[in-house]
Amino acid sequence: MAKVLSIDPGKSKCGLVLAEISENKIYKAIIIKSELLENYVRKLNTVEDISQIIIGNGTNSEKIIEKLNFFKKEIISFEEKNTTFRAKARYFELFPIRGLKFLIPREVFILNKNLDAISALIILEDYSKIKFTLNKNIDIKTWLKL
């Protein structure tokens, strides 16, 4: 099954989400240093059947697209306006607050969270017009930060 890689580009770090559109499932979600992105995508492309890359058109996107020119399939630049802001709300859809924690302001729970991968998820959802769910083996609260 062909998968799609969505990237929220940034100067120092990027959020990445690997998803299967036909299943509406997220299989991988990470945050990676921007300088390591090219090698990571090269390696990922050797083990996953990636059919296209969707990249947000914001900060540093043109430079990242140039670095990914080895990818011989489709690279799509897509609008990413307000994805970081929207990622805060999407975080609580993915990880609802339970119990007495519900009484604490939501902002407290995301102060130190890196939301770049959730921003990449929102870019993918906006592009495909599909709400994705998490694969049962993934816990994107514990981001792998490379």
Image (cartoon, rainbow, N blue to C red):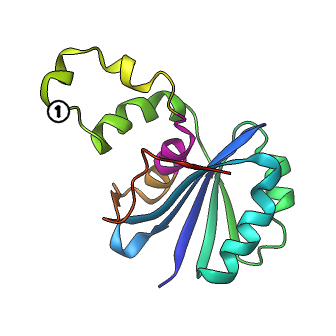
What residue is rendered at 52% in x and 48% in y? 143
Residue sitting nearer the eye, 20 or 97:
97
Queried whether the magenta region covers residue 137, the answer comes back as no
Q: Main secondary structure of the magenta part?
A: helix
Where does residue 49 sit, x and y in percent of width and height?
Answer: 59, 82
**Residue name at image x 64 percent, y 65 percent:** 53
Q: Tell me where residue 146 appears, x and y as whole percent.
A: 68, 51
Left or right: where does residue 111 sit relative to residue 44? left
Q: Amino acid at mark 1?
A: Arg
Secondary structure at numbered mark 1: loop
Report the residue at 48% width, 27% height from top: 85
Query: Looking at the image, which residue sits at the far left?
Result: 99
Residue under numbered circle 1: 98
Query: Count of labels shown?
Result: 1
Label 1: few (<14), some or many (≥20) within 10 Å?
few
Q: Is residue 18 above or below residue 80?
A: below
Horizontal arrangement in the rendering, residue 142 relative to residue 66 (left or right): left
Q: Is residue 138 above or below residue 142?
A: below
Give the residue at the far bottom of this rendering: 1
Q: Which x, y percent locates residue 87?
A: 45, 35
Q: Nearer the viewer, residue 103 or 24?
A: 103
Q: Position of residue 58 (x, y in %)?
A: 70, 38
> The magenta stretch spans which residues?
114-123
Nearer to me, 88 or 144: 144
Compared with residue 49, is residue 109 higher up or lower down, i.e. above or below? above
Is residue 115 one of those drawn in magenta?
Answer: yes
Quarter-of-image position of residue 60: top right
